[in-house]
């Protein structure tokens, strides 16, 4: 097997996920979104088929695979027009962090539900005043006897309304040094003092974004995942998977946009023959095909490095993958709209909505500017600018 192609098992996994997702498709996804409903049937079917927790250890209901496997699932869903944002969050971020740092009891408690889709877990890191600067988060966890008391605010938190729990990034203060220490807490979404408000978005998606208010939420001792002195290493354990998943989400969307454009270019006839016979239409689509393939390759590289335990190299590749995939997806969506002419803006053809959906990829979960900062500093050895 060449290093540049995926294993038979991975390719078969992609085929099966695509088959399952194609039963639902883009129309299902957008109709759920526009009517304010959820894609719960699809989510639970992915769980039943064993794809949702494919990266989680088998003893907790998972498939025992790696981040490359769950990323493939995410990509194929998006390529069928069903990009499920919570795939990035629940199995990849929360599943990874709990799988790596949770106690045996915590793994037994939370991982099976993450795997079968009945115990979906959201992730809350971003704050209104901290933004990209994670070091400035002010959500605070303090000890009170055997319990923890949590206070703070979070913003841009996906899917809180369909999650049973949220993995919240908070901080405690080191009594001796006064330095801030990041900690991870699992908070039930129905806990007293935990409230959330939907943020109206222009994106057509059944998955919503929320502002979260945490006021004196009391949590048992076992809500803390990992060591309270574990620091940033525990937090960052979930961030490489997040970038790899976001890249797969983007390349899947890009593939969907390109497929729509190519299909239309083959059937639409103006002047003499299909418009796809004109280089003005054909070349941009060929360009997108190349850009998507390059983004997919660096995403697979990032996943392979991560699964091999090379965190440092995986960090660089994951950032590059996320950057390349967002650029490829934005270009593919734009070209798909252009290929459709006036129909590109219609609801009937469903490509205009991809403009906003793909554009967010340049911002979340980490902005392209912060990735360029990372590459300038870590890959090129240039001075830190922020």
Image (spheres, rainbow, N blue to C red):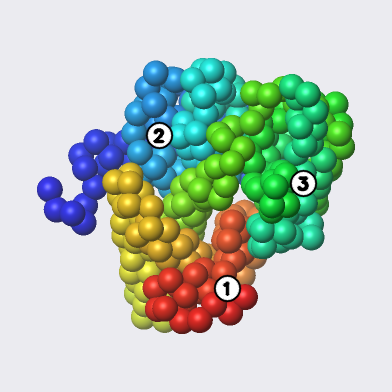
Residue placed at 50% from the left, 64% from the top? 326
In the figure, 250 relative to 75: above or below?
Answer: below
Q: Do the residues labelled 1 and 3 touch (CB within 8 Å)?
A: no
Location of residue 258 in the rendering, given as x and y in whole percent from the top left corner: 44, 61
Location of residue 316 in the rendering, given as x and y in whole percent from the top left corner: 40, 63
**Real-space CA distance between mark 3 and mark 2, rounded to the nearest whole angstrom:** 30 Å
As helix, strand or loop, the secondary structure at mark 3 comes to loop
Between marks 3 and 2 in the image, the one whose residue lies nearer the viewer? 3
Per the image, the residue denoted by label 1 is 369
Q: Which mark is residue 139?
A: 3
Corner quadrant of residue 363: bottom right
Mark closer to the chain start, 3 or 2: 2
Per the image, the residue denoted by label 2 is 55
Nearest the camera: 170 or 323? 170
**Real-space CA distance between mark 1 and mark 3, rounded to the nearest whole angstrom:** 25 Å
Q: In this view, does 272 lie to the left or right of 42?
A: left
Between marks 1 and 3 in the image, the one whose residue lies nearer the viewer? 3
Mark closer to the chain start, 1 or 3: 3
Residue placed at 39% from the left, 26% from the top? 57
Location of residue 220 in the rendering, given as x and y in whole percent from the top left corner: 72, 22
Q: Residues within 10 Å of mark 2 (few under 14, many from 20)?
A: many
Q: In this view, does 386 lie to the left or right of 80?
A: right
Mark closer to the chain start, 1 or 2: 2
């Amino acid at each position: 097997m060449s290093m540049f192609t995926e294993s038979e098992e991975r390719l078969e996994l992609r085929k099966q996920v695509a088959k399952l997702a194609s039963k639902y498709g883009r129309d299902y996804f957008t109709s759920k979104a526009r009517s304010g409903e959820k894609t719960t049937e699809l989510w639970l079917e992915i769980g039943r088929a064993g794809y949702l927790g494919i990266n989680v250890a088998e003893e907790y209901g998972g498939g025992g695979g790696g981040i490359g496997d769950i990323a493939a699932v995410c990509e194929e869903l998006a390529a069928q027009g069903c990009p499920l944002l919570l795939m990035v969050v629940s199995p990849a971020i929360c599943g990874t962090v709990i799988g790596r740092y949770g106690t045996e009891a915590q793994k037994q408690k939370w991982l099976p539900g993450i795997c079968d889709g009945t115990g979906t877990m959201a992730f809350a890191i971003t704050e209104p005043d901290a933004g990209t600067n994670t070091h400035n988060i002010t959500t605070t966890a303090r000890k009170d006897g055997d319990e923890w008391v949590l206070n703070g605010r979070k913003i841009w938190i996906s899917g809180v309304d369909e999650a049973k729990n949220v993995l919240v990034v908070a901080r405690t203060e080191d009594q001796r040094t006064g330095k801030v220490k990041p900690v991870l807490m699992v908070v039930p979404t129905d806990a007293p003092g935990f409230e959330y408000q939907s943020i109206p978005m222009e994106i057509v998606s059944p998955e919503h974004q929320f502002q979260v208010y945490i006021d004196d939420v009391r949590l048992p001792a076992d809500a803390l995942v990992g060591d309270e002195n574990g620091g940033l290493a525990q937090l960052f354990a979930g961030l490489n998977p997040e970038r790899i998943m976001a890249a797969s989400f983007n390349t899947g969307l890009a593939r969907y946009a390109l497929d729509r454009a190519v299909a239309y270019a083959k059937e639409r006839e103006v002047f003499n023959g299909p418009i796809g016979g004109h280089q003005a239409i054909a070349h941009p689509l060929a360009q997108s095909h190349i850009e998507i393939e390059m983004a997919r390759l660096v995403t697979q590289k990032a996943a392979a490095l991560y699964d091999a335990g090379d965190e440092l190299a995986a960090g660089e590749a994951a950032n590059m993958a996320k950057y390349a995939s967002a650029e490829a997806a934005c270009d593919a969506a734009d070209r798909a709209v252009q290929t459709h002419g006036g129909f590109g803006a219609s609801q009937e053809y469903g490509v205009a909505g991809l403009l906003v959906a793909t554009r967010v990829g340049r911002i979340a979960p980490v902005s392209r500017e912060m990735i360029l900062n990372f590459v300038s500093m870590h890959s090129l050895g240039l001075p830190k600018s922020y």
